[in-house]
Image (cartoon, rainbow, N blue to C red):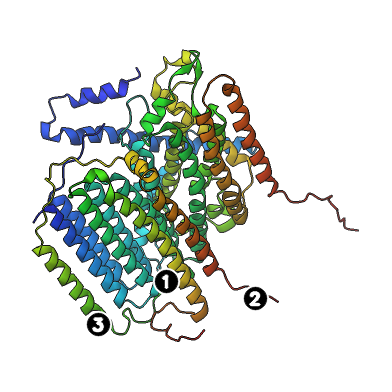
C-alpha cells in the first residue's frame, strides 16, 4: 500500500461521494456541488500521479490541474447562471419539478 | 529559506487530512440546510489544498484556496441566496434516490478494486520534487501558451454567457 | 540594533532549557508571539488615535476621560467588550454565529506571516508569498457571509451581501496592481521584492517602486483598493451606522463584536504591510544617509504614516453609494490597473540607454495621465446652474 495507492483511494472515494450527491439530492445547486467534488477528485488524482510518476520535472500534472481549476470555475459560473434563469421561470430549483419540455 | 518538507508517507497527517476531506464531502452531500452544505464543501476544499501542499504542488494548493474557496464557494452561496434555497421545505432526496445510491456504490467498488489490484510502481518516497511557481509560469508561457489563450477565450465566453443568462428578461414596452 | 530581535530570538533559543526535539516548536512560538502582541496593541492604540484624530478633524475633542488625554480609552473599551452579555438571537444559527469571527481572524493572522518586518525578519519565507497572502485574504469574505446569514436578520444579510460584492470587486484592482510589481521584480517572494528596492541612486535617492510612473499609479490604485477591502470610509456602506445600523455585525455583542472589529483593523494592517513591501520599499530607509536607523523602525514608521492617511481620509471624505462604488471598481479601477501592467512592461523594456531615461518617464507618465483623465470623464455628471426656490 504505497502512498500513491492511498491518494488514489481517497480520490476514488471523493469521486463516488460526489457522484452519489449529484444523483441523489433534490436541489439543483447541490448537483453542481457534487460535480465540483468530482472535478476535485480528478485533480487530486492528477497531482498524485504527477508527484509519484516518472517525470515530475515536466510539470504535466500541475499544468492539467491549473487548467482544470480554471475551467471548473467557469463551468460553476455558467451552471449557476442557468439555475438562476430556471428559478426565475419555474420558481423552484428542485430537479424533480423541472420536467416539462415546453417553455 | 525553509527546508524542503518531509516526503509524503501514509502518516498520521495524511490520515487526518483525508478524514477531514472525506467527512466534509459526505457532510456536503447529506446535510439538509444548503448553506451548511456549502460550508462543509469549503472544509473539503481546504483539506484538498493541504493535500496538494503535501504533494509538493505549491502553486496548485494555493490556487485551490484562491479559486475554489475565494470564488466558487462564494458564487454558490450567492446562488443559494438569490434562489431563496436557504430554507429547504421539501424532501432532501429526489425520487429514484436508491438507484442513484446503487450506481455510486458500484462505481466506488469498481474503482477501489481496480486500484487495489494495480501494481503501481511509484517514485521513491525520498525523491525531491520541486514545482516552483516560476517554472509553472515559464511552462504556461512557452509550451502551454495555446491552452492558456484558449482558456482565456473560454473564460471570457463563460463570463459573458453567465451574465446574459442571469439577466432578467427585459420586456419591451 | 537592526538585528536586535533576530539576535534576541537566537539567544533565547540557545538556552539549555529547551530539549532539542522541541527547538523548532519553540522557534515558531518565538516568531509568532511578537506578532500576536504587537499588532493587537497597535490596533488598540489606533482606535484611540483614530477617535481623537477624527474628533479634531470634526472640530471636537475625542475621548479624553480615561487616562491622560484619553490614551487609556482602549483599555476601557476592551473591558466593556469583555464583560458585555453575549446575546445570540433565538432564530440564529448558533454554530455559524459562533464560527464567523473565528473564520475572520484566522486567515488574517495567517496573512501576517509572509510580510517582512525588517531585514531578515520575516516569519515564513515562502517562495510564493504574495499568492499565499491573497489566497488567505480571499477566505475572509466567507466569514462575512457567515456573520450576515447566521444572524437571521434582513439588514445583516443585506449588509453582508453588499460587503461581499464590494470585497470581490475590489480584489481585482488589488491583485492586478500587485501583479505589476511581481512582473517587474520577477519573483513572488516579498523578501526578494523588498531587497530589490534597496540600494540608492547616486548614493542617496531611494529606488522604491513608488518613484516610477507605474509605481505611483499602482500604489494609488492599491491604496484605494485597500480602503475598499477593509470596508473603511469612504467605502463603509456595509457597516455604516447611519445607513444600515452596523450591517453584518448587528446581532453581535460583547467579545465577538470585539473580534470582528479587531479582524477588520488587523486586515487593514496586513494589506498596508503588503502595500509597503510592494511599493514603498518595505524596510528600506528613504534616504541613503538615514540607514543607521533600524529596518523595523522604518517599516513601522511607514505603516504609521499610512494609517494616519487612512484616518485623515475617513474624517474628510463622504461615503460612496453602493452603485457608485461598484461602478468605480469595474469601470475605472480595473481598466487603469490593466493599463498600468502594459505601461510597466513598456517601462521595463525601454531600458535606461541615453535619452530613454527621460523619455520613458514622459511616455509612461503621459499614457497613465491621459487614461486617468479620459476614464474619469465618464463619471462626470453635468453640472447645471443651481435654481433656488424660496418660500414665498
Q: Earlier in the sequence, mark 3 or mark 1?
A: 1
Which residue occupies the foreground of this view, C387 or B132?
B132
Marks 3, 1: nearer the viewer? 3
Residue at image coords 24%, 66%: A15
What number is the disc on residue C287? none
Count all numbered tags in the image, as a single digit.
3
Residue pointed to by mark 1: B86
Whether the residues at callouts 1 and 2 have beta carbons within 8 Å, the answer is: no
The answer as to whether the residues below labels 3 and 1 share one chain is yes
Which residue occupies the foreground of this view, C172 or C31?
C172
Chain at tag 1? B
Residue at image coords 42%, 41%: C266
The answer as to whether the residues below labels 2 and 3 share one chain is yes
Chain at tag 3? B
Q: Residues within 10 Å of mark 2 (few under 14, many from 20)?
A: few
Q: Is residue B164 left or right of residue C127?
A: right
The secondary element bearing badge 3 is classed as helix
Residue C125's quadrant in the figure?
top left
Q: Picture coordinates of residue C377 (x, y %)?
A: 70, 46
Which residue occupies the foreground of this view, C316 or C173?
C173
The secondary element bearing badge 1 is classed as loop
Residue at image coords 30%, 76%: A23
Instruction: Give the answer, above or below, for where C273 lies relative to C6.
Output: below
What number is the disc on residue B99? 3
The secondary element bearing badge 2 is classed as loop
Residue pointed to by mark 2: B171
Amino acid at each position: 500500500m504505497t502512498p500513491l495507492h492511498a491518494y488514489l483511494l481517497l480520490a476514488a472515494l471523493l469521486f463516488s461521494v460526489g457522484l452519489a450527491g449529484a444523483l441523489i439530492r433534490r436541489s439543483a445547486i447541490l448537483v453542481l456541488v457534487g460535480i465540483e467534488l468530482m472535478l476535485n477528485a480528478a485533480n487530486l488524482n492528477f497531482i498524485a500521479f504527477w508527484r509519484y510518476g516518472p517525470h515530475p520535472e515536466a510539470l504535466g500534472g500541475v499544468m492539467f490541474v491549473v487548467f482544470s481549476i480554471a475551467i471548473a470555475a467557469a463551468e460553476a459560473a455558467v451552471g449557476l447562471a442557468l439555475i438562476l434563469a430556471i428559478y426565475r421561470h419555474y420558481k423552484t430549483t428542485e430537479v424533480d419539478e423541472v420536467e416539462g419540455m415546453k417553455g | 529559506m525553509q527546508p524542503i518538507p518531509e516526503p509524503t508517507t501514509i502518516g498520521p497527517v495524511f490520515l487526518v487530512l483525508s478524514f477531514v476531506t472525506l467527512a466534509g464531502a459526505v457532510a456536503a452531500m447529506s446535510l439538509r440546510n444548503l448553506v451548511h452544505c456549502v460550508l462543509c464543501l469549503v472544509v473539503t476544499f481546504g483539506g484538498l489544498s493541504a493535500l496538494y501542499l503535501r504533494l509538493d504542488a505549491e502553486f496548485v494548493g494555493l490556487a485551490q484556496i484562491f479559486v475554489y474557496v475565494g470564488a466558487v464557494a462564494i458564487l454558490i452561496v450567492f446562488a443559494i441566496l438569490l434562489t431563496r434555497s436557504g430554507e429547504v421545505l421539501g424532501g432532501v432526496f429526489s425520487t429514484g434516490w436508491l438507484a442513484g445510491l446503487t450506481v455510486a456504490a458500484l462505481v466506488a467498488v469498481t474503482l477501489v478494486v481496480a486500484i487495489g489490484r494495480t501494481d503501481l510502481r511509484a517514485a521513491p518516497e525520498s525523491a525531491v520534487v520541486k514545482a516552483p511557481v516560476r517554472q509553472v509560469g515559464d511552462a504556461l508561457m512557452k509550451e502551454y501558451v495555446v491552452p492558456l489563450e484558449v482558456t482565456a477565450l473560454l473564460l471570457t465566453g463563460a463570463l459573458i454567457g453567465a451574465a446574459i443568462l442571469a439577466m432578467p428578461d427585459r420586456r419591451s414596452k | 540594533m537592526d538585528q536586535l530581535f533576530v539576535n534576541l530570538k537566537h539567544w533565547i533559543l540557545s538556552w539549555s532549557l529547551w530539549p532539542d526535539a522541541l527547538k523548532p516548536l519553540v522557534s515558531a512560538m518565538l516568531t509568532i508571539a511578537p506578532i500576536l502582541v504587537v499588532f493587537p496593541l497597535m490596533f488598540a492604540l489606533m482606535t484611540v488615535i483614530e477617535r481623537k484624530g477624527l474628533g479634531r478633524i470634526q472640530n471636537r475633542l475625542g475621548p479624553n476621560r480615561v487616562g491622560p488625554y484619553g490614551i487609556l480609552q482602549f483599555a476601557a473599551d476592551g473591558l466593556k467588550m469583555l464583560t458585555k452579555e453575549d446575546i445570540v438571537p433565538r432564530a440564529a444559527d448558533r454554530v455559524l454565529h459562533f464560527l464567523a469571527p473565528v473564520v475572520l481572524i484566522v486567515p488574517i493572522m495567517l496573512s501576517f506571516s509572509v510580510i517582512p518586518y525588517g531585514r531578515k525578519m520575516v516569519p515564513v519565507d515562502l517562495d510564493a508569498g504574495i499568492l499565499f497572502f491573497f489566497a488567505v485574504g480571499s477566505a475572509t469574505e466567507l466569514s462575512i457571509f457567515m456573520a450576515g446569514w447566521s444572524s437571521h436578520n434582513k439588514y445583516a444579510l443585506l449588509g453582508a451581501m453588499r460587503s461581499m460584492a464590494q470585497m470581490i470587486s475590489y480584489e481585482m484592482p488589488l491583485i492586478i496592481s500587485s501583479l505589476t510589481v511581481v512582473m517587474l521584480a520577477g519573483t513572488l517572494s516579498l523578501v526578494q521584492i523588498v531587497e530589490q528596492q534597496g540600494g540608492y541612486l547616486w548614493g542617496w535617492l531611494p529606488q522604491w517602486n513608488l518613484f516610477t510612473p507605474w509605481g505611483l499609479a499602482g500604489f494609488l490604485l492599491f491604496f484605494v483598493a485597500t480602503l475598499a477591502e477593509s470596508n473603511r470610509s469612504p467605502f463603509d456602506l456595509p457597516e455604516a451606522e447611519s445607513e444600515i445600523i452596523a450591517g453584518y455585525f448587528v446581532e453581535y455583542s460583547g467579545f465577538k463584536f470585539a473580534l470582528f472589529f479587531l479582524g477588520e483593523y488587523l486586515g487593514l494592517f496586513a494589506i498596508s504591510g503588503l502595500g509597503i513591501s510592494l511599493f514603498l520599499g518595505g524596510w528600506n530607509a528613504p534616504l541613503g544617509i538615514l540607514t543607521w536607523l533600524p529596518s523595523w523602525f522604518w517599516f513601522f514608521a511607514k505603516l504609521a504614516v499610512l494609517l494616519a492617511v487612512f484616518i485623515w481620509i475617513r474624517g474628510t471624505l463622504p461615503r460612496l453609494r453602493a452603485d457608485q462604488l461598484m461602478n468605480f471598481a469595474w469601470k475605472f479601477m480595473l481598466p487603469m490597473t490593466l493599463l498600468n501592467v502594459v505601461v510597466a512592461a513598456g517601462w521595463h523594456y525601454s531600458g535606461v540607454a541615453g535619452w530613454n531615461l527621460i523619455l520613458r518617464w514622459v511616455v509612461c507618465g503621459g499614457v497613465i495621465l491621459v487614461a486617468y483623465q479620459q476614464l474619469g470623464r465618464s463619471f462626470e455628471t453635468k453640472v447645471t446652474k443651481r435654481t433656488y426656490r424660496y418660500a414665498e
